[in-house]
Each structure stands twice: as C-alpha cells, then as structure tokens.
Amino acid sequence: MQHTDTLTLYDSQFNSRFLLGTALYRSPAQMSEAIKASGSEFITLSLRRQNPQHNDGEAFWQLIKETGCKLLPNTAGCKSAKEAINLAEMSRELFATDWIKLEVIGDDYNLQPDPFELVIAARELIKRGFKVLPYCTDDLILCLRLRDAGCQVLMPWGAPIGTGQGLLNKYHLQSLRERITDIPLIIDAGLGSPSQAAAALEMGYDAVLLNTAVAKADDPALMAKAFSLAISAGRSAYLAGLMQRRQTATPSTPVLGQPFWHQQ
Amino acid sequence: MPLSSSLNIAIVGAGLVGRLLAYQLSQLNVKISLFEANPLNIHTEANQLDAAAFTAAGMIAPISEALEADLHSYYLGKTSLALWPKIVSELNLANATGINYQHSGSLIICHPQDRAELQHFSRQVQKLATATGAVFTALNGDDIRQLEPGLPNSFEQGILLPEEAHIDNRALMSSLLQQCLRKGVKLIDNTIADIDNNQVHYQNQRHSYDWVFDCRGIGAKKHRTELRGVRGELLRVHCPDVNFNRPIRLMHPRYQLYLVPKPGRQYVIGATQIESEDRSPMTVQSMLELCSAMYSINPAFAEARILEQNTNLRPALNDNRASVLICDRHVSINGLFRHGYLIAPAIVQSVIRWLEGQQCQHHKILFSTAEQSSA
C-alpha cells in the first residue's frame, strides 16, 4: 500500500514529490538514468549560457525532452532582481514555460539567497504572469512576504546548496510549516541523504528538490531510487500520523506476566 | 597479419586522433590521404587554434579524470601512459624541435575552507585504488612545498598522483604533422570533405579508398546524431615569476581548476565545462573565476601576461565515452570528450590492431558496428 495523494503546484498535479536537478552528472546518459530511477516528473535546469535558439546543446536538450518531465528552468547565478527577471523572461521564451525557480544569490561563497532582491523579483515576475517557485531561506518573515507577493509555492533551504548538511534548523522549518499551511512548501537544497529527505516529508513538507546528492553519488541512479523511496516513506508517515514523543517508556505489549501487586 | 602496403586509406580530420593515426599508419608504409577543413600552415601554430587539440591543456591524468568520468577512461589512459614515451621519443629523434613530455605526476590541493572537496576526492581515489591498483600519496603542507616550492603555506593538505603526466600538446601536434608529411602522407587541407562509405567527396572530386577514417570530432555530426559539443574555456598566460613542475588541480565546491605548466614558463588554466555548443569568446565571469583561482594559487600570477583566451568544443556522446563505429568501410572515431591526450594513443593502437585483424584489450569497450544506411 502506498499513499495516493497528489502534489498540487499552482494549477498542476504531480504524483511524485521529488524534484530533481540536471547538473553535475558525469554524462548525459547517467543523468537520464537517474531521472528515470527517481520517478521525478519535474526537473530543474539552468539556462545560463545555453543558447537553444542557436541549436546549442541540441543533443543534450533532446535527452532532457525524452525524459518526458515537466521543466523548471532556474535563474541560477543571478545576483540581483533585475538580472533574475531578465533571465526568467529569456527562459520563458526559450523553454516555452511560465514556470521559474527563482534564485537570487546574495553571497558567492555559500550561495545564500538574497531575501531583499528575491521579494522584489518575485513580485515583478508574478505580475508578469510567471509561476514562481522561490528558493529562499527558512526565515518566517521572508516566507510570508513571498507569499504576500503571490508565490503559491515556497522553497526554503534545508542547508546551503551542495553542502549535504540536511535540515539544519529544524525548529525554524517546523514553525514555518505550522505557520504556512495554505500553500505547498518544498525543501530545496542542502539534502545529503535519503533519511534527511524522509524527515522533511515527515515534518509535513510537501516535496523536496535536490541535485548534488544524486549527481555526485557513485551510482546516481541507485541514489535517485533511494531518495524516491525515502520521500515516499516520509509522505506516507506524515499522512499516517506520527506518534507523539513521550518522556516515559510505555510498553507496547501489556506486561501480562507481572502480578498486579507488583505494579501498585 | 601485417598491413599490406597496397592499402589506400583516407583520414578525414587532422586533429589529434587524425594525426596520430596518420603518423602511425605512415610508419607502417600505408598510403594515406589526410583531409582537413582548416588551412594548416605547418610553420605557424596560431592558425590552428580551431582544433580542441591545440587549446587543450595536454594532461594525461587517468586517475583524476576517471573520478569525473568512469573506469573506461582510466584503463584507456593507463595504456596511453605506456605508449606516449615511445611516440614522443620517436618524434623527437626525427624532428629538431623537441616535444616536452613530463611524467612528474599531478598534485591535488584545496584551500582550507574547501577541505570537504579534497576529502571527497580522497575517498574516491581510495576506492579507485582498491579496484585498480592506482597509486596515490596523501601529502601534508611540507610535502606539498617540497614538491612545489611555489605554493603558499595556506595549502596544508594534498594528494599526489605520481603516475600522471602532461605533454606539450602544440609541439606534439606540429611534430606529428611534419612527420606525416615526411613519410609521404598526402595532405589536403583547407578543404571540406564529405564521407560516403568508402568515398570522400571534396571540391567536386570523388575518390574511393579501402577504408575511410572519420576523425572530425564535432564536424562529424551528420553521421553521428548523438554527438554534442561541450564548451571548454581556457586561458594561456606567461608568468616568469612562477615555476611549477607538474599540473595542479585546485578543488573547489563548484568547479575544479587545473593549471598545467608549458615550456617557457607558460601556463594553461582551465576549469569550466559547459553544456553548450557556443564557440563565442570567454565570458567575463569565467575570466574572473580562472584569474582569481590562479591568483589564489600564487599571488605572483597577478603579474602574468594573458597570452590567449580560448574556447573549444569537446566532442562527446551521451555516455561521454569514446567510440569507434564501423559502418562497412567508414570507420568513425569520436566522442573523446575532454580525454583526447589521455586516451588517443590507446584508441589509435586498438584501431591499428583491428586493421591488422587482431583485437586488443580495449576492443570491446571501444568498437561497435552499424548497418550501412540505405541513403
């Protein structure tokens, strides 16, 4: 038995709760295998320096199309709202999609999102008809501002991109989930292992997006499958209802052999 | 079975594979026509920058590359490492200008804040060593500075891969061409050639051969639809103040930079690998990244002179592995990706063995056959 609920992002339904990146694989063939094994239906790709209008990277592009997945172009590498908006417009034209993973980077070293520019860019892109999925930190106020700007999905980080640190601030992430219940939340970036992905789903997050942990694994397809199973397990656990943690041990089997007088 | 000297062979594309194959076949007294789309003036190098083989850094690094690719490139690279010294010494005997080939290993380092990258590399190397017997040595700061006194004290951990080598690729390319011409290879350059099975069409002419070897790299797209170009960006600088003895790879979370010494205190620096067939010049961002990484390896690079910025397209197939595809009399050698100097000698050796009716150890992973298309 498996959970059968679907994930709704804007107006689209997805069976899979696993969004996968297309960078860093050792070869395009390996990327295709990993996407297939992941069961993902939504994959991210970067427009930067690809020029599909000149038939650049046509063979690579063909492989991406063959996966049958919906495309989520990103604005990776942008450092200002203006830059991100321009790149989003180019993506819309080249990939023929309104969807955009909005990344505005504030710090070169840990690739931390710039919250101020992010809100400006999100507001403008929503106005221009984009379906914006912002990559943000776990700051509650930032997330509320992005929601107010019209984002119908938010993607807080678990940890900085590519670090594999997992859910660094569980307290923030938990309170974010408790406060924002009307739109889906996706953990984007920082996940290193399937157990961390499962933990995100158990916490009530709707999906996860990752790339490095799969692409840099010795066997990316196998790791993609492992994440897929963990994500599914985490979602099932969330739906099934996790038990409350308790301070004292309570036996799951009644202690029949013990005389009553011994229990007081 | 030795090759018959009555064999008549066309080689289309005078890049690394085309030249190496022409050179080695000419040693066996086979009649060869070598076609090249670009003009080849053998006395100047500058007008040959179009081929990836010229702009490449010329590393022969089976271990470093296997970690980014797979074991195929490792085994092909090991064979090539054994073949290069003989090829180079033969060429150096025959030509006045010597080719610098150095078997001094390569050094893997990182900045202190990127130590996780080196640890990841180290774990991967250990795994490879267990599987293949590859040799590596973990280094501390003193070891590093003993090998490369030009590296600052901030580099405290590193790995030496002693089996790796590097070659002065430009000297090699021009030496190969000179020897081919001396051995009677017929060069038809500045000419676009089309291949139709055993025939080559060019300038309204049509000639038939016993075999046509298609070594055109990205130019062979018509015959290999899967082929794609992967953009690489490289700088060539002159820096008399810095002396490094071996290629240095700098681990970084987002890219691996390599710095390869060339004769005359020149250095080739590259890092980027972009899924694009854009051949336009280097971007400012790449320039900034390459230059700042170079500067962080040794501040004396601030005074280096930038001699060239180059972009090239490395021909790659979907699995990023090299392939020899035989379609009747048309033999396509392609997909060497960024491993040209690493694997070309092994591939050329396999191809010659195959012509001689034998199969070498790499035959299975390289060769495949295709039906001749009815068109």
Image (cartoon, helix red, strand yellow):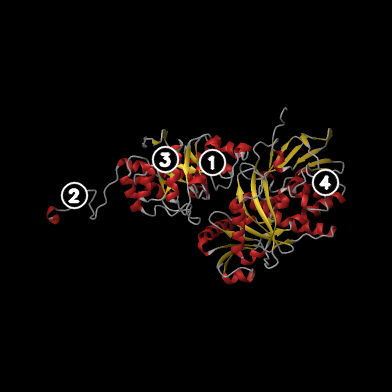
Q: Disc 4 and disc 2: Cα gap in Å?
A: 88 Å
Q: Earlier in the sequence, mark 2 or mark 1?
A: 1
> Relative to the observer, which residue lies in front, A84 or B46?
A84
Look at the image and tell me whether residue A50 can be seen. yes
Position of B274 relative to B149 (above/below): above
Mark 4 → mark 1, Cα distance in angstroms? 43 Å
- Crowding at label 3, few (<14), some or many (≥20) Cα neighbours within 10 Å? many
* Residue denoted by label 4: B2
Residue that label 1 marks: A33
Q: Quadrant of the C terminus of chain B?
A: top right
Q: Secondary structure at mark 2?
A: loop
Residue B239 locus on image (x, y percent): 69, 64
Q: Is circle 4 on the same chain as circle 2?
A: no
Label 1: chain?
A
Q: Position of residue B36 (x, y in %)?
A: 79, 43
**Type of amino acid at the residue the image marks with label 3:** Arg
Q: Nearer the viewer, residue A162 or B238?
A: B238
Q: Mark 4 and 2 residues: CB-CB less than 8 Å, in contact? A: no
Amino acid beneath label 2? Leu
Mark 1 crowd level (few <14, some 14–19, many ≥20, 10 Å Cα): some
At label 4, counting other C-alpha atoms closer than 10 Å, the crowd grade (few under 14, some 14-19, many 20 or more) is: few
Report the residue marked by disc 3. Answer: A17
Percent of width and height locating residue B341:
70, 53
Q: At label 1, which amino acid type do we have?
A: Glu
Name the front one of labels 2 and 1: 1
Residues at marks 1 and 3, CA–CA distance in whole angstroms: 18 Å
Tell me the subunit letter for badge 4: B
Q: Nearer the viewer, mark 1 or mark 3?
A: 3
For the residues beneath circles 3 and 2, the answer to whether they share a chain is yes
Are callouts 4 and 1 both on one chain? Answer: no
Q: Is residue B135 visible?
A: no
